[in-house]
Image (spheres, rainbow, N blue to C red):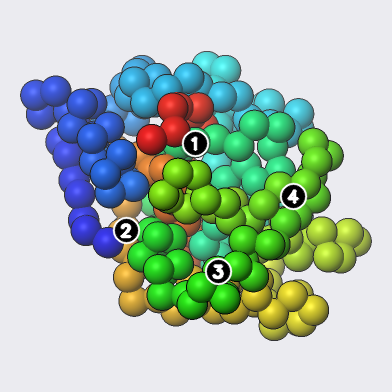
Amino acid sequence: MREVTVLVDATDYKIRVKSLVESLGMAMIKNMNIDSNDELVELSHFMGNLQAPFAEDLKEQVEDGFVYRVTSTASSSKRAISQTNKEFLLHTDGTKSNVVPDFIALMMIKPAISGGQSVFLDSWSVLSNFTDSELQGILSLSYQTRFGKRKILEVKGDRFQIKFNPYELAKELNPSLTITGDLDVGNAFNEQPLISQLCRIFSTSGKCLKYYLSPGDCIILDNRRILHGRTAFHGTRLLKRVWIQGQAE
């Protein structure tokens, strides 16, 4: 993946960001204002329509209707892996939401004391290395949501679109499973070798971009293409996230 950075005070920076996301899948914006949600919401709205978080029990963590505070700590009582200080494997967002977001904005507010490196991977660069037979196998994989079955991988036009969250897939295979720590991919997917293979290939890819995000750093990414995750960390880490519905390119 190519590293792409835009300064928030650059001329027509929003147009530049949208162009980079459409062509490369993601862009980083530096120097965003962390004392207000205005710039984050304005940039997100430039990408498309803002989408409220799906889960009802997340509403107390939502600001201005659409900005979700992702506060992560060492507490093991948290309901989701995103709220712990554990490694968060590469995934896409909203795989079980009623509407899966097309784009995501992630703005760093407070980095961890140590660790917490953000990781991004262009799925297209990895999927191109699979054989036709392997791709057909992946294209056949689906998962269940309350809104019906969804494909992990689809072809739209001449492009792949991916919906992949190993934690949600593991919980589907074992509904009683609660994951607030490291996911044992081998055991979780011992009956789904293709999913296990995807996890391993994603996590070991040398094509990942890795950043220690600073306050005011914002990533806009195509959630249908770019997987994201983070390394384990110490301390408390705070991001603000916006889900966005845009036009498929």
> Of the residues tagged 2 and 3, which is closer to the observer?
3
Image quarter hosting the N terminus = bottom left
Q: Position of residue 244 (x, y in %)?
A: 48, 29
| In this view, 67 is above or below 135 | above
N-terminal-most mark, 4 or 2: 4
| In this view, 59 is above or below 2 | above
Q: Which residue is mark 1?
A: 102
Q: Which residue is mark 4?
A: 79
> Of the residues tagged 1 and 3, which is closer to the observer?
3
> Of the residues tagged 3 and 4, which is closer to the observer?
3
How far apart are the two marked residues, 3 and 4, measured between alpha carbons? 33 Å
Residue toward you, 245 or 187: 245
| In this view, 17 is above or below 224 | above
Q: Crowdedness of circle 1 by 10 Å Cα count: few (<14), some, many (20+)?
A: many
Answer whether labels 2 and 3 touch (C-beta < 8 Å). no
N-terminal-most mark, 2 or 3: 3
Quick check: 140 left or right of 159? Answer: right
